[in-house]
Image (cartoon, rainbow, N blue to C red):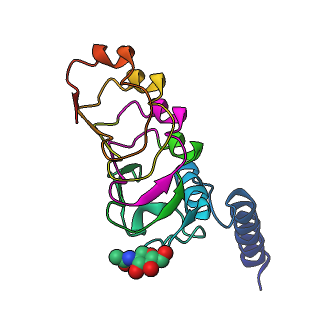
């Protein structure tokens, strides 16, 4: 090797080392982590969540998950999926979510108040489950919400007065 070639080679090695150090094996994806946390709390006898592989770079190729062009999760479609367990606070981290479709399952526990963080939510469909507790007041922060179907659960109390200010909302 001439000195010049070996200098180039050394430079290439240095660049490669820097790139390796800068890029972890899997860039962390908070939306994927939140969905995977949901998966771990659910019982899934029909295997609808089997494609939810947390080692992928993002959850956009997982079945029942839809992303926008910027790889942000905008839909979760798990209606009629025979899943049970509680919803949990993690879904409140899917801040780009527009459609949360969890109807006709066996979900129990309370509606997490963290769902009030889903500022872009258009449709919240939790009907026909076994949800208990009251409807969180925090849902009144969902300024984009147009459809909220919570019927056929075991919810107590009434619809919080705060939700009346959501003028586009149809509650069923
Ligand atoms: C739902 O899951 C239960 C097991 O928990 C199973 O017995 C039942 O057949 C499943 N229902 C459907 C429609 O797949």
Indicate whether 147 appears above or below 158: below
Indicate whether 55 appears above or below 72: below
The N terminus - image quarter: bottom right
Picture residue at 40% right of the left edge, 41% below the top:
96
Q: Quadrant of residue 103?
A: bottom left
Indicate whether 6 appears above or below 110: below
Q: How many numbered marks have been drawn onto this rendered protein structure?
A: 0
- Counting from the top left corner in percent of width and height, residue 148 is at 28, 36
- Identify the magenta region: 95-120
Picture residue at 29% right of the left edge, 31% below the top:
145
Q: Is residue 91 magenta?
A: no
Quadrant of picture, ligand 1: bottom left
**94 sits left or right of 74 in the view:** right
Q: Nearer the viewer, residue 19 or 153?
A: 153
Q: Is residue 112 magenta?
A: yes
The C terminus - image quarter: top left
Picture residue at 41% right of the left edge, 53% below the top:
71
Q: Nearer the viewer, residue 112 or 12?
A: 112
- Counting from the top left corner in percent of width and height, residue 88 is at 57, 47
**143 sits left or right of 30 in the view:** left
Q: Nearer the viewer, residue 103 or 37?
A: 103
Q: Residue furthest bottom?
A: 1
Q: Quadrant of residue 33?
A: bottom right
- Counting from the top left corner in percent of width and height, residue 127 is at 32, 48
- Residue 33 seen: yes
- Residue 50 seen: no
- Counting from the top left corner in percent of width and height, residue 135 is at 44, 30
Q: Quadrant of residue 98?
A: top left
């Amino acid at each position: 090797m001439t000195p010049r070639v070996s200098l180039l080679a050394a430079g290439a090695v240095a660049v490669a080392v820097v790139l390796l150090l800068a890029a972890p094996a899997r860039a962390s994806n908070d939306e994927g982590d939140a969905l995977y946390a949901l998966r771990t709390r659910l019982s899934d006898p029909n295997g609808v969540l089997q494609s939810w592989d947390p080692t992928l770079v993002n959850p956009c190729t997982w079945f029942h998950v839809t992303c926008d062009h910027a790889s942000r999760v905008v839909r979760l479609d798990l209606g009629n999926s025979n899943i049970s367990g509680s919803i949990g606070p993690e879904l409140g981290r899917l801040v780009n979510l527009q459609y949360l479709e969890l109807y006709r399952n066996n979900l129990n526990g309370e509606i997490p108040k963290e769902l009030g963080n889903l500022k872009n939510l258009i449709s919240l469909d939790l009907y026909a489950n076994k949800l208990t507790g009251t409807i969180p007041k925090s849902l009144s922060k969902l300024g984009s919400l147009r459809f909220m179907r919570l019927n056929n659960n075991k919810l107590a109390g009434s619809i919080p007065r705060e939700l009346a200010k959501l003028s586009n909302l149809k509650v069923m």
